[in-house]
Image (cartoon, rainbow, N blue to C red):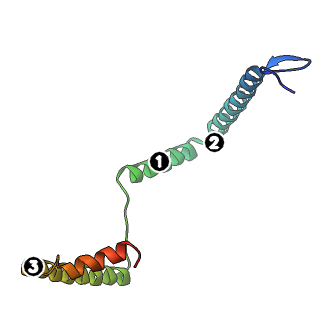
Amino acid sequence: MEVHGRQPGNPNSARERYEQGQERLTEAARARVARAREILEGLPEVRQEALREARGDATDERQGGDVLELSAGATRDVEALDLEREKRVEALREAFLEGSLNSPERIEQAAARMLGG
């Protein structure tokens, strides 16, 4: 059992063991990076240039923003939804101008829906 960060027979505290583990992880990561650099240096220059260009192209696409392309069918569906929304907004606008939008009946209906009824 560990008491105050020390185990019986082990002078290292829990904090020291943690730090040693972190050092081992850091050293292992540095070794992997060094190995990757060695591999990259061993590639022919043409291949290195292609890799640089690929990385640059990917970076440029991300910086330019997201792009969303819709199929013709999806575009028609979006247009239909937009038209439907415009009709609904116009109907609500007319009801507001007539004074029937905030009628007691509609307010009761809205309250009932909000309360789960």
Q: CA distance from mark 1 to mark 2?
A: 15 Å
Give percent across and percent down for residue 52: 50, 44
Q: Are marks 1 and 3 in contact (CB under 8 Å)?
A: no
Residue identified by numbered label 3: 99
Q: Amino acid at mark 2?
A: Leu
- Mark toward the start of the polypeptide (3 vs 2): 2
Query: Between tags 3 and 2, which lies in front?
Result: 3
- Local crowd size for mark 3, using a 10 Å CA cut-off: few (<14), some (14–19), many (≥20): few
* Camera-side residue of 26 and 3: 3
**Left or right placement of residue 29 versus residue 95 in this view:** right
Q: Are marks 3 and 2 in contact (CB under 8 Å)?
A: no
Q: CA distance from mark 1 to mark 3?
A: 63 Å
Residue 53: which numbered mark, if any? Answer: 1
Query: Between tags 1 and 2, which lies in front?
Result: 1
Residue identified by numbered label 2: 43
Label 1 element class: helix
Give percent across and percent down for residue 106: 23, 80
- Local crowd size for mark 1, using a 10 Å CA cut-off: few (<14), some (14–19), many (≥20): few
Q: CA distance from mark 3 to mark 2?
A: 76 Å
Identify which residue is drawn at 37% across, 80% down: 74
